[in-house]
Image: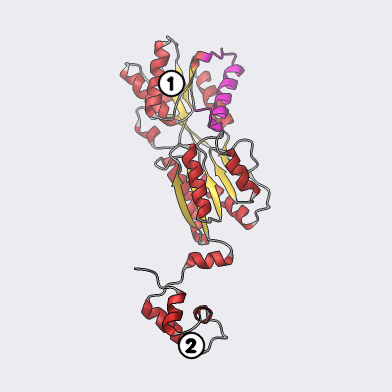
Amino acid sequence: MSNVTIKDLAAALSLSVSTVSRALSGDRNVSASTREKVLSAAEEMGYRKNPVAASLKAGNTRTVGVVVPEMWSGYTIQMIHGLQEVLYPLGVRVIIADSGEDPAREAENILMMERFMVDGLVVGLCSCLENKDLYKRLLAQKTPLAFFGRIPHGLEVSQVLVDDYAKSFFMVERMIRSGRRRIVHLEGPESIYNSLERCRGYRDALTKYGLDRDSSLIRRTGMSIEDGARAIDCLLEDKVSFDAIFSFTERPAVGAMNRLRELGLRIPEDIAVCSFSGTTYTDVVYPRMTTVEPPMYAIGETVAQLLMEKIKDPDSAPRTVVLNAEIKMQGSTGY
């Protein structure tokens, strides 16, 4: 059934559209009898005020778009919960789109949000190498933007992240000090800037302790459990000796752990394993995995606050907020 409009009310009452509109808004220049007639007809005909149209008339939609690289993980879900806790009390609605780790779909999602005339955008990138021209255009138009986690390196934007370099350095240093000397790094895709920072932390920790930065120990993987298992197979095929693994993220680490156990290797006695994390995978594998845990709920809250700052004042300077990530020591490293 079609929505009843002001034009429908005006036609039914033989009044002008402007008179009906003023009566519905409580304009004192409309007589009491006319206002009562309009309100009565609105009730009978099922008229409902269109909040989107009213917002557009006021110059905003009270809606923000959230574009995420993937939707199903605990990492994303926690972030969205934190973001909604800030925005919902402000009367701001949220439209969420999943890019499926595809930069082309990410661009489509951004353009869709533009068509929906959202007041601002929160974005987690699929790639720091793609869609830069699109984001530059949005920034030039003063579209309010805020990024979380995966950031558009090289652009001056509001963003929330953790110190990937420092936390990676700490994790690798901890394994070195526990006696590990041949530490594999499962490196993430080069299109994700966090991957570069985590690898830098890994390399610098090896240098600090005078360990050989053997390139055969660095294996670029994808983001899946299967990618981690394949990395182990390749290491063994290449006859690379190792006694520990530091993974860019938890899914390849889980795949590596599963494959090592299938081969009869013990964790952590033979091979220690740790990673950055964002899901519950690290608590359901055995032994539980030592991880760096980004505060995703707080990241959601903070990125929402940064976006509202830009919505209120598009000319305000962009801010970068670095939140502390928790080091979660568990059985996979033996300490």
Mark yes or no: residue 159 visible.
no
Please state, as top left, top right, bottom left or bottom right, where the N terminus lies in the image: bottom left
Highlighted magenta segment, given as a residue range: 189-215
Q: Nearer the viewer, residue 117 or 10?
A: 10
Q: Position of residue 313 (x, y in %)?
A: 65, 56
Please state, as top left, top right, bottom left or bottom right, where the C terminus lies in the image: top left
Q: Position of residue 95 (x, y in %)?
A: 46, 53
Where 293 falls versus 178 (above or below)? below
Type of the residue with mark 1: Ala
Task: List the residue tagged with mark 2.
Answer: 34
Type of the residue with mark 2: Thr
Q: Position of residue 76 (x, y in %)?
A: 45, 43
Where 4 falls versus 70 (above or below)? below
Q: Is residue 207 magenta?
A: yes
Task: List the residue tagged with mark 1.
Answer: 272
Name the secondary structure under disc 2: helix
Going by the image, does 113 lie left or right of 285? Answer: right
Q: Looking at the image, which residue is at 40% across and 24% down?
A: 228
Q: CA distance from mark 1 to mark 2?
A: 79 Å
Judge the density around disc 1: few (<14), some (14-19), many (≥20) Cα neighbours within 10 Å. many
Comparing marks 1 and 2, which lies closer to the viewer? 2
